[in-house]
């Protein structure tokens, strides 16, 4: 459809104008894809600034929870620490312990736990039959 429009403009002699517009738009596009960091700022995904973000102590629990939620596999402790930036390992372990306690305290159907060499959010085993039925 767009191609038809472009081709039909060729018959009207507007081909050069359209080509110029396309070239201008293409030249304005960013050369490297940008990603939004954990703190909401835009950052380069080329790998050149991976260590620039760092979670504050107040952000640790929600950031770790978000990471565990989106992870396809259990996240090893060292990888979590690396992602969080310049945060002491003791603070990361504190945040993980607090996250586990939060899920336990509220009687959630989910739990944060260490399994298969990493951390993950999963459903509680006692609800397995309901999940299987679903």
Image (cartoon, rainbow, N blue to C red):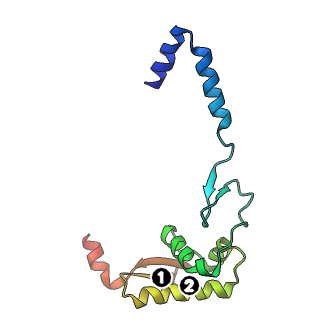
Mark sitting earlier along the chain (1/2): 2
Residue at horizontal 65 percent and vertical 71 percent from the top: 83
Quarter holding residue 77 = bottom right
Residue 51 placed where, x, y %?
73, 67
Residue at horizontal 48 percent and vertical 14 percent from the top: 8
For the question of whether residue 117 can be seen, the reply is: no
Quarter holding residue 129 = bottom left
> In screen coordinates, is 69 left or right of 82?
left
Q: Residue 130 — which label?
A: none
The answer to whether the residue labelled 1 contacts the one labelled 2, judged by CB atoms less than 8 Å apart, is yes
- Distance (Cα) linking label 1 and label 2: 8 Å
Observer-nearest of 64 and 24: 24
Q: Residues within 10 Å of mark 2 (few under 14, many from 20)?
A: many
Q: Residue 112 — which label?
A: 1
Q: Assign a secondary structure to mark 2.
A: helix
Q: Residue 96 — which label?
A: 2
Observer-nearest of 14 and 124: 14
Residue at horizontal 26 percent and vertical 77 percent from the top: 130
- The answer to whether 97 is drawn above or below residue 39 in the figure is below
Residue 84 placed where, x, y %?
65, 74
């Amino acid at each position: 459809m767009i191609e038809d429009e472009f081709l039909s403009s060729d018959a009207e002699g507007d081909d050069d104008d359209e080509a110029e517009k396309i070239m201008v738009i293409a030249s304005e596009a960013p050369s490297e894809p940008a990603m939004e960091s954990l703190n909401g700022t835009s950052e380069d995904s080329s790998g050149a600034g991976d260590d620039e973000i760092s979670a504050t102590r107040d952000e640790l629990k929600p950031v770790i929870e978000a990471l565990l939620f989106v992870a396809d596999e259990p996240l090893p402790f060292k990888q979590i620490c690396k992602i969080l930036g310049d945060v002491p390992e003791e603070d990361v372990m504190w945040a993980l312990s607090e996250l586990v306690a939060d899920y336990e305290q509220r009687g959630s159907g989910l739990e944060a736990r260490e399994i298969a060499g990493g951390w993950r959010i999963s459903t509680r085993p006692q609800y397995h039959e309901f999940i299987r039925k679903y």
